Image: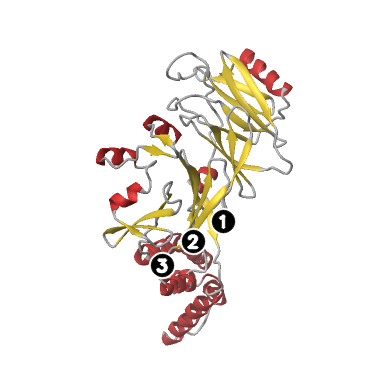
Amino acid sequence: MIKASRYILILLTVFTLSAFLPGFFRTAFERHVPVPFVMYSSVSHHFVMRKAADGKTRYYDSKGKQFNRSQYEQQLPLFHFRQLMTDGLMPDSLFGKPVDVFEINNANFFSRITPSDIDAPKTGLYPLFESESGRVALEKPDDYFRINSKGIQFIDPASNGVKPGKSALFTKVLTEKGMTFPVKMIAGIPTIRKKYDQGYFIVDKKEHLFHLKMEKGLPYCVQIRLPENFHILHIDCTDFSNQEFYGYIITKDSQVFVLETDTYKMINWPVKNYNPKTDKLSLRGNLDSRLAIVDKPNDVYAYASNRKYILQNEYHEKLKPNLSRGAQIANQILFPFKIESGPETSGFHRIVLKLPGKSLFVIGNLFFLLLYLGIFFARKRKRIAVVELAIILLTGLYGFLGVLLLPTVKK
């Protein structure tokens, strides 16, 4: 019984060490890697970068040209227009038209989509706002909706009961439009802190896409035609002032689309080298161009398009690893696996076993096994436990420490 309890404690120690030791190692040896802030110049039509390193900020472009801060800002008049106007450096005209500050500001937009936005738990209950209330500001509804196998149900939070009349009305309309219950995805902006309301975009059981909102208390629903073999991974809704599009659609094959307002036309935003599960995606637009930035752990990719989403230019910069080569090798040797309450790319906490990408851990496991045997014979112990050897061989450093920290109890 004592022997079984000891092995259980050793395994618990292995689990605990695999959850904390790799993190401590990265904290000790990880170094800061400066990441460039990439923009696209409407003046030179080259990529221009700003990067802070060694206490200084560098300004340069994709051709290697260096700038001071003022010259850098002049390369981006649609982004730094307020500063340029203050300095008296703003051009009188752009693209053959007089400068209109309101038009510039209205056309600028920015979005950021991270892996944690995609891999995140869903609330299950959503507020459906009145889209045509006639009021300046949106108002909170007195109910919330959910969609299950029976259809859409509106819940009164005061009584926690279903509103049968409203639920039946909306379910009837959704069914007539072809929606199959239950649904796979509901995407929207469930807050009154937005400029206007465009309702929700819903992917049903058959992966058909619908637009649902409420206008003057009545349901508005449209089924959006999708191309063949079009599988939606994520929908990110927007509320930009120009109301150019409803939001972004990311497909399971890592393509990015914008969903045009009113027409429901899907336009492919040219983005390459993008993995939604691991990479951060920044999307920016102005009067002149569209810019997509893919941030990977060791790379930055940038893609500039015109306003019709036709690719014009692209840029790639390799980043230094945040661990030195020696620290990377040591990390791969020391830790055969690790336990994460993540993964790191998600805000949804769950226990995840992360296996190594390379087999260098075998060297570490054999090293700790031989080290244990050396300690065993140095202590002149007479009987060796095969189970202990197996634990160390399989778990390396974790098992080695577990066995040493929890020695055999002498009778």
Instruction: Give the labeled residue for mark 2.
Output: 15
* Residue 130 percent coordinates (x, y): 52, 18
Can residue 409 be seen?
Answer: no
Three-letter amino acid code at disc 1?
Asn
Relative depth, front residue between 88 and 191? 88
Three-letter amino acid code at disc 2?
Phe
Label drawn at residue 273? 1
Instruction: Give the labeled residue for mark 3.
Output: 323
Q: Residues within 10 Å of mark 3 (few under 14, many from 20)?
A: some
Q: Which residue is drawn at 56% across and 20% down?
A: 155
- In three-dimensional space, the C-alpha distance between marks 2 and 3, rounded to whole angstroms, equals 24 Å
How many numbered discs sit on the rendered protein? 3
Q: How crowded is mark 1: few (under 14 residues within 10 Å), some or many (20 or more)?
A: some
Q: Give the answer, above or below, for where 8 lies relative to 221.
A: below
Label drawn at residue 84? none
Can residue 284 be seen?
Answer: yes
